[in-house]
Amino acid sequence: MATDIEQPEVEEEILDEPADVEPEDSKPEVETVEVEELAVEDEVAEAEQAGFEPDFEPDAAEETGELVSEESGGWFGRLRSGLKRSRESVVGQLNAAIAEFRDAGDEEFWERVEEILISSDVGVNTTAKLVAELEQEALEKNITSSDQLRKLMIEHAARMLEGPVELDISRKPTVVLMVGVNGTGKTTTIGKLVNYLPGEVMLAAGDTFRAAAIEQLQTWGERTGAPVVARQRGADAAAVAHEAVEAAQQQNADVLLVDTAGRLHTKINLMAELEKVRRVIERRIPDAPHEVLMTVDATTGQNGLRQVKMFAESVGVTGIILTKLDGTAKGGIALAIANETGIPIKMISVGEKVGDLHPFDAREFAEALFGDL
Amino acid sequence: MFETLGERLNTALDGVRGSGNLTEDQVKKVTREIRLALLEADVNYGVVKEFVSNVRERATGAEVSKALSPGQQVVKIVDEELANLMGGTAHKLTFASRPPTVVMLAGLNGHGKTTTAGKLALFVRKLGKSPYLIACDTYRPAAIDQLQQIGRELNVPVYTEGTEPTPEDIAERGLKAARDGGYDFVIVDTAGRQVLDADMMEELKRVRGRIKPHSVMLVLDVVTGQNAVEVAQAFQEYADFDGMVLTKLDGDARGGAALSVVKVTGRPVRFASEGEKMSEFDYFYPDRMAGRILGMGDVLTLIEKAEQQMDQQEAEQQGKKLMSGKLTFEDFLQQMQMIKKMGPLSSLLGMIPGLGKQLQGVEISDKQLGRVEAMITSMTAQERRNPKLLQNPSRTRRIARGSGMTQQDVKNLVKQFNEMQKMMKQMGKGGKGFPGMPGMPFR
C-alpha cells in the first residue's frame, strides 16, 4: 500500500516532459552510415538463416499451388458460410428478432437489437448510436415489415462503414508500412498483399524482435517470389526500413511492404520505435509511407478501438485490414472503429490461403452482419 | 476511455450516503452501470445478464455501512461476486506421479501459444523440472523456427520433425524422445486454428488422443471479444482443455473474455502471461482479475509485491505515518528505492486503482524515478524530515543545482508531495479517496 503513494507524483513528473524519446531523432545521419557499413554482414546473416529453410520448402510448394485458388462464391460466400455455421448465435438471433418485428415503438424489440449488436462486439457507444438512428427512422417512416427494417439496418451499418477502400499505390516505389498489435496477422497479411498488389513488390523484414519473424517473412518471399530485405534478429528496425527503401528505389520496385514487430499500443517505447521507422522512411521519400495499414483481429473486443486510436495517434494509420474473419467473430469491432475513429476499413482477410485478401465492401459486410442467411 | 466502475457507481449514487438500505431505484441505477461496465470489458452478453441479476439480488436491501459510500459498497459486492465466479484462489500446477508431465497448448491463431510454450518451460524449470518442447505447428511459416529460437535462448531442448509428418506423429515421437532423454515436463505446441475449421479441430482431437496429455491449456488473448464463449466451447469439445493461459495481459484490455470462458466452461485460468520477456509469466490469481475487469486496478498484487520488499512492522509504521499525513521525504525516498526493487515501474503503475485511466498513454520510466531520487538526495537531512522548509526559494535553488534539475522541477516535486500528503490524510479518515478500496488492509 505504501508504495501506492508516490505514483501520482512520478506520473505528473513525466507529463511535464513528454519529449523524452525525442533525442534519438537528432542523430539520423549516424543511422544512415551504420546501414551502409553493415550491408556486408547482412549477406552473412541471410546465408546463416538459409540453414533453417529446408523445413519449409515442402510446405511452401504445396501452398503455392493454392495461390490462385478461390472457393466458389468468393470471399463473401466464405464469410456467409462461416457465419451460417454459427447460426445459433448472433445472426440467427438477429434474424429471429427481426422476423418478429411489427412495430417501431416496441421498446423491447430495440433492446433485443441492442443486445445482439453488443454480442457482435459493436460496443456500447456505437450500438446506442446505431439503434437510436434506426429507431428514429423506423418511427418516422412508419416501418412495419421486417424486410423493410432489415434493409434499413443494412443501410445504416453500411453508411457507418463506408470509406475510401482503394490503396494508394500510384508512386514508384509506393511505401506501405504495416503495423499492429502482436498476433493480429501482419506478416501473413503481407504475404497475401504481395499476391494481391500489381507490379514488383519488395518486402522489408522490419520485425527484428520476435523469434523467427524474419524467417516467416522470408518464407513468404520465397512463396511469392518477392525479394526480402532483411538483417539479423535484434537489428534496428529503422535501419532495415531505410535500407529497404533505398533498395526499392534502386531496383525500381513498384511497392515496398515494410513489416514491423507486433507491439501493444500501451508500450510507449515500442510505439516511439515505430515512429522512428516512419521518420526514417519519410526522410528518404518525403511523402512516404504512402499507406500505413493496421491489422486488427476480427475477434478483438472493445480494446480494438483503443489499439486503433493509439496507433493512429502515433504513426497516422491510413486504413485497417480486418483479419481472421473466418472464425466465429462477427467483426462488429469494425463498426466501432469506423464510427469512432473515422479510419476506413480497407481490406478484409477471410481465410488462411494467400488469395484470401479482399477489398472491404461496406454493404456486403453489413449484409453479412444483418442479412437473411 | 472508460470510467472505472467505482467512479460510475459513485456518480449514479451521488448524494446517497449512510442512508440505511439501498432503495430499489438506486439498485436499478447501479445494476445498469454494472451491466455497461461489464459489456465494455467484453464480458459475454449472456454471462453479464446472469451476473447482474445475482448482484441485484444481493444489493437490494443491502445495508449501507457508514464507512463506505454506497458506490463502494456495491463495488464490494460486485468484486466478491466476480471473485466467486472466477474461483477464489490460484490453480497451481500439479505434476504427474509418473513423469513426464505432459501439457498440450491449444488456441486460436496469434494468441501466443508458441511464446507461452517458452514461458511455461522457463516457469517449470524454476520449479525444479526439466522441460522439453515439442513443435507441432506444421502450418505457420517459421513457427518451428520460432520455437527453436526460444528453446536456444532458454537452453531448453526442442523436438522437431519439420512440417512433413502429421502433428500427432510428431507429438508421439517427441514424447518418446522426452522419456528417453529423462525429461520430466513436456510441453506440446500446436498450430493456431479457427474453431470453424472442422479439419483442424479434428486434428487437435487426434493429437490429444494420441499423447493423452495430463493437461490441455487453452491459450487465450485477453483482448478477445464476445465470441470467446463460442471459441472456448469448441475447444472444450475437441480438446477438452482443463485450464487457460491468459496472454497479453500487459495491454490495457479489460479481459472480460476470461470471465465468460470460466463461466461457460467451468475451467479456470491457470496462468497469466504479460510482456515480451520470457520471465513475465505467473500463476493467475483469479481474485485479482475482478479488479481489472472493473477497472479498479490490481490492488492485491501490488500489496503483495510491496510486502515482499517490506517487513510487516515497517509496513505498519509506514502506513500509520501515511494516514496521519506525516510523511517525510526520507520515507518517500525509502519507498522509492523499494519500488525499484519490485520491478519495472510501468507494470506496477497499472496496478494502482484510479491510476489506470490517467495513465493510459503515459509510460513512466525508471529514469524519471531516478530524477526524483536525485532531487531528494540533494536535500539536507533536515529538509527531508521537514518538507515545510522547502518553501524557501534559496533551498529549492540549491537542490535544483545539486540534482541537475530546474528550480521549477523541485517546486513541482514539493507541491506534488504536499498534495499527496493531503490525499493520504483523507484516505486515513476513510474518505472517498479511492473508490473500490474500502479499508485497505495495512495489516
Image: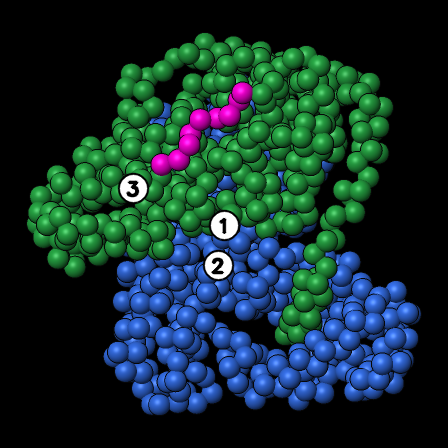
Chain colours: A green, B blue
* Any part of residue A180 in sight: no
Q: In the picture shown, does residue B208 fall above or below B346?
A: above
Q: Nearer the viewer, mark 1 or mark 3?
A: 3
Question: Do marks 2 and 1 share a chain?
Answer: no
Circle 1/circle 3 CB separation < 8 Å: no
At which x and y percent is residue A133? 25, 51
Q: Chain of mark 2?
A: B
Q: How many marks?
A: 3
Residue behind mark 3: A157
Quarter occupied by residue B71 = bottom left
Nearer-the-camera pick, A167 or A73? A167
Badge 2 marks a residue whose secondary structure is loop
Name the residue: 64% across, 62% down: B348
Q: CA distance from mark 2 to mark 1?
A: 8 Å
Measure the C-alpha gap from mark 2 to mark 3.
24 Å
Query: Residue at (53%, 38%) from the top-left corner?
Result: A317
C-beta proximity under 8 Å, tags 2 and 1: yes
Q: Are marks 2 and 3 in contact (CB under 8 Å)?
A: no
Q: Amino acid at mark 1?
A: Arg
Q: Please give left or right for residue A48 compared with residue A115 in the image.
A: right
The magenta stretch spans residue A224: no
Q: CA distance from mark 1 to mark 3?
A: 21 Å
Q: Is residue A215 left or right of residue B44?
A: right
Q: Which residue is mark 2?
A: B1
Q: Which residue is mark 1?
A: A306
- Relative to the observer, which residue lies in front, A177 or B73? A177
Q: Amino acid at mark 3?
A: Ala
Above or below — where is B67 with respect to B237? below
Between disc 1 and disc 3, whose residue precedes?
A: 3
Image spot of residue B387 (x, y percent)? 79, 84
